[in-house]
């Protein structure tokens, strides 16, 4: 049995924690939750928040035989927010 080491690094993802943070930031800034979310989306090149199912699908792929040759890497799922090469 082979062992691989892969890190999944998600960026903004539509989770309960993200909703809580949006409410807290809205209250602190005196704006609506929708305005906070719109600000967050504007900072993401793909202009969308990842869904938890997308992260889960990646994890399932990585543990499948289809990803048998992938190891020693980090996969960033952040809509292009992290500068690349």
Image (spheres, helix red, strand yellow):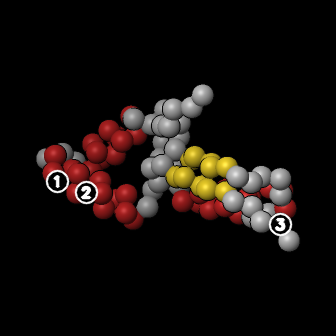
Whichever of callouts 1 and 3 sits on the residue coming sooner in the sequence is: 3
x 77%, y 66%: residue = 3
Write down the residue under mark 1: 27
Vertical side of 52 occupied by 80: above or below: above
x 27%, y 42%: residue = 35
x 69%, y 59%: residue = 5
The quarter of the image holding the N terminus is bottom right
Contact (Cβ within 8 Å) of mark 2 with mark 3 = no
Contact (Cβ within 8 Å) of mark 2 with mark 1 = yes
The quarter of the image holding the C terminus is top right
Judge left or right: residue 40 versus residue 63: left
57 vs 83, nearest the viewer: 83
Q: Is residue 40 visible?
A: yes
| Residue farthest to the bottom, as pictured | 1
Q: Position of residue 40 (x, y in %)?
A: 36, 42
SS label for mark 2 = helix
Q: CA distance from mark 2 to mark 1?
A: 6 Å
Contact (Cβ within 8 Å) of mark 1 with mark 3 = no
Judge left or right: residue 51 versus residue 39: right
Q: Specify few, some or many for label 1: CA neighbours under 10 Å numbering under 14, 14-19, or 20 or more.
A: few
Write down the residue under mark 3: 2
Whichever of callouts 2 and 3 sits on the residue coming sooner in the sequence is: 3
Q: Specify few, some or many for label 3: CA neighbours under 10 Å numbering under 14, 14-19, or 20 or more.
A: few
Q: Is residue 46 visible?
A: no
The image quarter in which residue 62 lies:
bottom right
SS label for mark 3 = loop
x 61%, y 56%: residue = 7
Q: CA distance from mark 2 to mark 3?
A: 44 Å
Write down the residue under mark 2: 23
Q: Position of residue 66 (x, y in %)?
A: 84, 56
């Amino acid at each position: 049995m082979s062992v691989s080491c892969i890190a999944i690094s998600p960026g903004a993802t539509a989770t309960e924690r993200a909703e809580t943070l949006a409410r807290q930031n809205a209250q602190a800034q005196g704006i609506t939750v929708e305005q906070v979310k719109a600000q967050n989306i504007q900072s993401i090149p793909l202009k969308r928040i990842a869904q938890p199912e997308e992260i889960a699908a990646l994890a399932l792929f990585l543990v499948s035989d289809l990803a048998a040759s992938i190891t020693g890497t980090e996969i960033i799922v952040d809509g292009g927010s992290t500068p690349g090469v």
